[in-house]
Amino acid sequence: MSSYQAPLRDMQFVLRELAGLEDVAKLPGYEDVLDVAEPILEEAATFASEVLDPINQTGDKEGCTWKDGNVTTPTGFKEAYAQFAKAGWIGLPVPPQYGGQGLPSLMLGPTLEMWNAANIGFANGPLLNQGAIEAIELVGSDEQKNSYIPKLVEGTWTGTMCLTEPQAGSDLAQVRTKAVPEGDHYRITGQKIFITFGEHDMAENIIHLVLARLPDAPQGTKGISMFIVPKFLVNADGSLGERNDVECAGIEHKMGINGNPTCTLNYGEKGGAIGYLVGQPNEGLKYMFIMMNAARFSVGVQGLALADRAYQSALQYAKERVQFRDVASRSPEPKRIIEHPDVRRMLMWMKSQNEAMRALSYVTAASIDISHRHPDEKVRKEHKTFVDFMIPIVKAWCTETAIDVCSNAVQVFGGIGYIEETGIAQQFRDVRITTIYEGTTGIQALDLVGRKLAQDMGATATRIGKQMQDTVGVILSLSKDAEHAEALHEIAEALKQAIAAVTETSQFIGMTAMGDLRKAVACGVPYLKLWGITAGGWQMARAALISAQKLASGETDEFYKAKIATAKFYATHVLTQSEYLKRQITQGSSDVMTVTEAQFELDRKSAVPA
């Protein structure tokens, strides 16, 4: 099994050339990021490869164990978490006043990618910490901020999101957990399932952010409030008090991410867990989406991370495995499989997809920072709408693509890839959950079509399309005699056609929604994919243009030549799917609901006798 090595060269290129690290450094409070960005990446890469990677496969095999309400994480996880916390990685984007480093969200792109590629089972714990910290920081009281955030940042405590219940699944309108007022706190009773790191042995306290209903709450999602429910109650002086009425009833036995304990939590079996209201009553779902959006971005990066690790594994194997003669050679000697065209095609497909996902994810992260701190309100608003539009795409397109990348990696290995010892099977198992948690791909598609596209009548989609078209225009204006002009023009033409497809499809969905909403959302997932491959192609075109300019200025780095070649492959092998997706959506949406529920079963029934 090959070890993980962070793709630092590409990460640095995307940060500086595509995501605009220098522009982010001009935002108030981020002035020092240019000085620390490279050392942070180097240190993170070292931690990922030397601390997290060695316990990845062993953590998967050993898994977590549950006994009498307590969960033990795999060997080495507790020690690795102590190192992770001591190094300050949890507080990377957290304001210094709470013990954080105050760095931009943009730096979460590469660091999250490294942690999850090296060991996703471990990385899920710190990932949830970020969401809990952000939610308390934005809507918690001053007392809650000062009591909980510093401990979460230093890693002494960890945080969770407690949304899902057995009867509710993703439908949070069905949440039944109750919160009854009692003095300065509430008594919480109910059950939550699928809680990531809901119980573990890596920290001394766990801070659960729980969705529950007050006695007089309205029905549906408008009647949900959010509460802080600590595993151990916190005394006035910050020390830990008695154990709260929160019990881990068991952990799930999963297909993958076995190093991550996924728990069922019972609240109030002994009279009611003590909880503290966060923000205003009945505003909990709005607050939880603060965590949810942060988590959705992070899960998209998780998909990218596992895809890149799978690609690295497949590439290493292809360079070593000797099998079959070259189809174009008369030599009887077998060749390394990387020399065979079909294997090379799969590797190029994986490489191009990973680079497109990385670029789109980091560019979105930069817009998060600009939407928060740019001095011009108009600019902040523009970037916020871009982020809101892109979050479901980053989450769903990156994770769906990652499954395909990991599947192709298994294919490169051949039969041995199906064997657990190689490690590639674990990556395929681990990645499968990413399209499901924090909202399935279908839910992301509904968000994109029903909210993001509809809320401003397609204005944001139109503006992004114009930005993509501007890139096409710049490339097509280049002289035909310019170096790499032929490849750039082919890339631009492919992107131009994809933009036209996404524009026409958006108009179709907008018009259809006014008369038949079900038909409009029927192919929401293909529509999201169309946006993903087009937005990814936009970033690949930008990367190719910048690389050509670097080469024209005298640079001789082979990295830039590979960028252009990879972008051209993406244009011919990925962007060309846009026409097919457009036809599927505009011509096939009405076919989705044509077969009745009863007709689905007809092939299992005997024919009616003549």
Image (cartoon, rainbow, N blue to C red):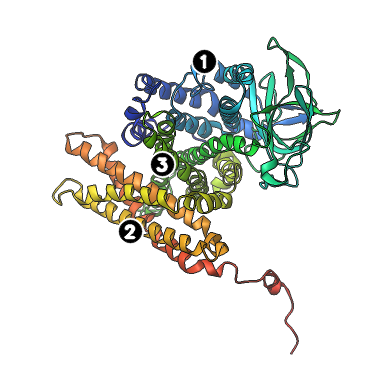
Q: Which residue is mark 1?
A: 97
Measuring from the top left, give residue 300's x and y in whole percent.
51, 41
Q: Label 1 sits on what residue type?
A: Gln
As drawn, the residue found furthest toward the left would be 481
Q: Position of residue 188 (x, y in %)?
A: 78, 31
Q: What is the crowding at mark 2: few (fewer than 14 residues within 10 Å), some, or many (at least 20)?
A: some
SS for dot 2? helix
Q: CA distance from mark 1 to mark 3?
A: 31 Å
* Nearest to the observer: residue 256 or residue 445: 445
* Number of residues whose C-alpha sits closer than 10 Å to that of mark 1, classed few (under 14), some (14–19) or many (20 or more): few
Tell me if label 1 and label 3 are in contact, CB under 8 Å. Answer: no
Q: Reply above or below: 600 against 199.
A: below
Q: Residue at x 48, y 40 (%)?
A: 304
Crowd rating for badge 3 (residues with CA inside 10 Å; few <14, some 14–19, many 20+): many
Mark 2 or 3, nearer chain start: 3
**On-image quarter of the C terminus:** bottom right
**Residue that carries the numbered disc 3 in the rendered image:** 360
Q: Which residue is mark 2?
A: 497
Q: CA distance from mark 2 to mark 1?
A: 49 Å
Q: Name the amino acid type tagged 3.
A: Leu
Cα gap from disc 2 to disc 3, whole angstroms: 19 Å
